[in-house]
Image (cartoon, grey):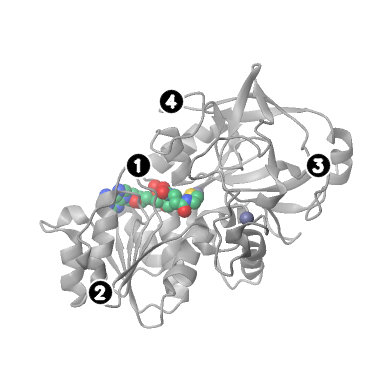
């Protein structure tokens, strides 16, 4: 059935479909029937085609990232617009889209600022898990189910605000480009936009998972001469080297702190360091691994709820820069479709990040692959 016809049949009606519900933390999700309401004004209902599984989904499931429950997780999705609510003008039924957890409302202070990308309509930092009108579009067994960071991609259909939906090239392969909704821009943009890695520089990437791998691709694209990759899981090293890492270090193989090892390897510290793990210890190590004068440290990982970063302020007085970034500082709806265009033109490649593909119903196996460190990115296909 073609997409336009499909939309005519379902537009304005509740859709019953399968979704993975996280009823509680630290337990498998259950794939069951949910009712997905039609989109209200400014909203879009999307048929999900693919979704990656990101470290942040796992952090929500293990409780380190606190979100309201029960919830439909997932925030790295690609799909096709099924129907639109009143006033939606940037997408129409049948359009291919990315589902992005950082909206771009184009009206708030951050969106109007030349550099701001942390739209004030985000639901990441103190998540309420509801649409902007304070209600939910998902019901399961008669109970309200919350959404996740305005996306919820672990479901056959989802409803999102138009401001979080990015229209992409109609020829884009939806089973692959979902990585442009999170892992790729988060890492690539951290290197290109936030750190502004320079040709010939030395970079250190703490954490060689999906997002860390995208940082490596960004450092390489910017012309870094040396890229040091740090991970406890040596199973990540071969792939990291194939992506451009020149030296791989496992902190457990050294008696001294890893920042001291980096200092000795580089003599003066790295030009750019990236924390892509999400622990306080590795954030401090990343800061102390960069050159004390011109070094730039970028924090990408989210530390466990309520933790505090503490370090000697002299580490900054010497001129170092400590920065953070969200989704690689891209203005999401404007810029991420352009990355997809570059992918279509073969200027950038996300395919090496995909190590596994599974049918959606095997979602818990996908999470197990991420937790066991066996995969970089596992893509769920619907
Ligand atoms: N030292 C070295 N390596 C470590 C350590 C450690 N102490 N602990 C874990 N690691 C390694 C793991 O072996 C793994 O290879 C890697 O760190 C983490 O990778 P993944 O694949 O588990 O996770 P990613 O790459 O999908 O996500 C990592 C983030 C830190 C980006 C993510 O968890 C996160 O905090 N995201 C929030 C930041 C953000 O911008 N979010 C936007 C939407 S996600
Ligand atoms: Zn993510
Ligand atoms: Zn905004």
Q: Residues within 10 Å of mark 2 (few under 14, many from 20)?
A: many
**Residue drawn at the location 38% of the way across and 40% of the way down:** 371
Is residue 10 found left or right of 33 in the rendered image? right
Is residue 199 found left or right of 251 in the rendered image? right
**Residue drawn at the location 78% of the way across and 56% of the way down:** 90
Q: Nearer the viewer, residue 249 or 122?
A: 122
Q: Nearer the viewer, residue 22 or 134?
A: 134
Residue occupied by mark 2: 291
166 in relation to 70, above or below = below
Q: Is residue 232 visible?
A: no
Q: CA distance from mark 4 to mark 2?
A: 43 Å
Which structural element holds mark 1?
loop
Residue occupied by mark 3: 85
Which structural element holds mark 3?
loop
In which image quadrant can residue 202 be found? bottom left
Q: Residues within 10 Å of mark 1 (few under 14, many from 20)?
A: some
Is residue 92 found left or right of 157 in the rendered image? right
349 in relation to 12, above or below = below
Which of the two discs, 4 and 2, sits closer to the camera? Answer: 2
In which image quadrant can residue 19 be found? top right
Counting labels gives 4
Residue 304: mark: 1
In which image quadrant can residue 335 be found? bottom right
Q: Residues within 10 Å of mark 3 (few under 14, many from 20)?
A: many
Q: CA distance from mark 2 to mark 1?
A: 27 Å
Residue occupied by mark 4: 27
Q: CA distance from mark 1 to mark 4?
A: 19 Å
**Residue drawn at the location 19% of the way across and 73% of the way down:** 265
Question: Where residue 59 sits: x, y (%)?
Answer: 42, 39
């Amino acid at each position: 059935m073609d997409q336009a016809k499909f939309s005519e049949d379902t537009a304005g009606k509740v859709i019953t479909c399968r979704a993975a519900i996280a009823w509680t933390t630290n337990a498998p999700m259950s794939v069951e029937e949910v009712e997905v309401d039609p989109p209200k004004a400014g909203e879009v209902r999307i048929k999900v085609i693919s979704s990656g599984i990101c470290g942040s989904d796992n952090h929500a499931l293990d409780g380190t990232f606190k979100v309201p429950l029960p919830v439909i997780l997932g925030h790295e999705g690609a799909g096709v617009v099924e129907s639109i609510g009143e006033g939606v003008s940037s997408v129409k039924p049948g359009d291919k889209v990315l589902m992005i957890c950082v909206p771009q409302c184009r009206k708030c202070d951050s969106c109007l600022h030349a550099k701001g990308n942390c739209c004030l309509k985000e639901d990441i930092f103190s998540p309420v898990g509801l649409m902007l009108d304070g209600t939910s579009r998902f019901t399961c067994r008669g109970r309200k189910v919350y959404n996740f960071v305005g996306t919820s991609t672990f479901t056959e259909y989802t409803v999102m605000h138009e401001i979080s939906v990015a229209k992409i090239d109609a020829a884009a392969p939806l089973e692959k480009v979902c990585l442009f909704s999170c892992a790729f821009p988060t890492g690539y943009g951290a290197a290109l936009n936030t750190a502004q890695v320079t040709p010939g520089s030395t970079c250190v990437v703490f954490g060689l998972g999906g997002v860390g791998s995208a940082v490596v691709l960004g450092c390489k694209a910017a012309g870094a001469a040396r890229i040091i990759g740090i991970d406890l899981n040596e199973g990540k090293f071969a792939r990291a080297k194939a992506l451009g890492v020149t030296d791989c270090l496992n902190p457990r193989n050294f008696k001294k702190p890893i920042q001291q090892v980096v200092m000795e390897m580089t003599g003066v510290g790295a030009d750019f360091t990236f924390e892509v793990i999400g622990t306080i210890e590795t954030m401090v190590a990343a800061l102390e691994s960069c050159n004390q004068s011109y070094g730039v440290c970028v924090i990408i990982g989210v530390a466990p709820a309520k933790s505090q970063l503490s370090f000697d302020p002299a580490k900054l007085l010497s001129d170092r820069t400590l920065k953070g970034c969200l989704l690689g500082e891209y203005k999401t709806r404007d810029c991420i479709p352009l990355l997809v265009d570059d992918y279509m033109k073969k200027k950038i490649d996300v395919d090496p990040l995909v190590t596994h593909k599974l049918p959606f119903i095997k979602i818990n196996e996908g999470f197990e692959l991420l937790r066991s460190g066996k995969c970089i990115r596992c893509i769920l296909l619907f």
